[in-house]
């Protein structure tokens, strides 16, 4: 009796990723590198498990060609599609009004009809990240997708209150995540910063749930069917 039940529970746990099989998952980050830092391992797993994963980068604040190129290589490593939304050169999110940002994200959601959206949380300290979080909240009125928030992103460690309520086991994709972060050389190698912070965060999150590496999420909205 126990053995089949255990196997069934195991299969259910493994098959949670099949929730998005054949569907589109949309990850929205304010800048190149935010998505890789927060959920690179999750995005790689989603892609490997049959989801179409679109990484939307809202703005490139500096070094447009370099940073877009880095983002493109990172997306390729993770098996995802890249979209740069403000794609006419270096722009800050503050350059547009909040309703324009919402309109931009609305268009993307209407086009892609995602089954899930992953984006910044309200716990962010970077104003651009908070702006993207707020605009993404508004897109929830368009469609009943699952909605997740990820760990605040930063290139240097800063203490920020964020308490994950769900964890994704990224043990099988941690090296892809690390590679995807490394290609953002303009943000790390060129500044003399190493990327081990992100392995450390994944290791600590993994310890919370008994796996080697994990990424933490907060759940904004999710249908348990
Ligand atoms: Zn950012």
Image (cartoon, helix red, strand yellow):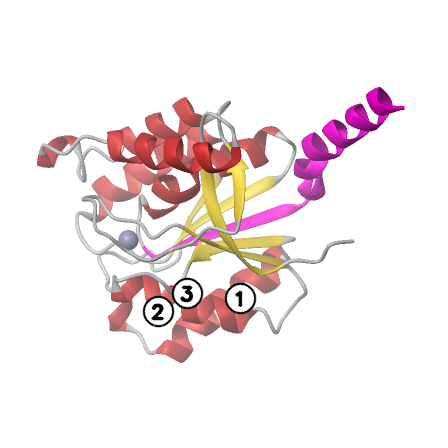
Q: Is residue 3 above or below residue 97?
A: above
* Crowd tier of the residue under label 1, counting other residues whose Cα lies within 10 Å: few below 14, some 14–19, many 20 or above: few
Rounded to the nearest angstrom, the CA distance separating label 3 from label 2 is 5 Å
- The magenta segment is 1-30
Query: Which mark's residue is nearer the viewer, 2 or 1?
Result: 2
| Magenta stretch contains residue 154 | no
Discs 3, 2 touching: Cβ within 8 Å: yes
In the picture, which quadrant includes the N terminus? top right
Q: Is residue 51 above or below residue 154?
A: above
The mark that comes first in sequence, 1 or 3, is 1
Residue that badge 3 annotates = 133
- Of all residues shown, which one is farthest toward the right? 1
Query: Which mark's residue is nearer the viewer, 1 or 3?
Result: 3
- Residue, x 69% and y 38% (percent of image)? 16
Q: Which mark is residue 107?
A: 1
Rounded to the nearest angstrom, the CA distance separating label 2 from label 1 is 17 Å
* Crowd tier of the residue under label 2, counting other residues whose Cα lies within 10 Å: few below 14, some 14–19, many 20 or above: many
């Amino acid at each position: 009796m126990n053995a089949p039940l255990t196997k069934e529970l195991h299969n259910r746990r493994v098959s949670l990723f099949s929730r998005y099989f054949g569907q589109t998952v949309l990850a929205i980050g304010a800048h190149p590198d935010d998505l890789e830092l927060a959920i690179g391992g999750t995005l790689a797993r989603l892609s490997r498990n049959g989801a179409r994963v679109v990484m939307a980068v809202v703005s490139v604040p500096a070094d447009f060609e370099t940073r877009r190129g880095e983002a493109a290589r990172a997306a390729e490593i993770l098996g995802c599609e890249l979209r740069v939304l403000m794609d006419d050169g270096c722009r800050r999110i503050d350059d547009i009004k909040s309703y324009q940002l919402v309109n931009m994200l609305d268009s993307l959601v209407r086009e892609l009809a995602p089954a899930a959206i992953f984006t910044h949380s309200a716990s962010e300290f970077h104003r651009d990240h908070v702006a993207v979080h707020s605009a993404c909240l508004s897109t929830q009125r368009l469609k009943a997708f699952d909605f997740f928030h990820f760990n605040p992103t930063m290139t240097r460690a800063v203490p920020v209150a964020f308490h994950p309520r769900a964890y994704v086991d990224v043990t099988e994709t941690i090296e892809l995540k690390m590679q995807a972060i490394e290609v953002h050389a303009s943000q790390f190698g060129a500044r003399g910063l190493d990327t081990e912070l992100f392995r450390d965060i994944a290791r600590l999150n993994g310890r919370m749930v008994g796996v080697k590496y994990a990424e933490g999420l907060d759940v904004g909205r999710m249908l348990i069917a």
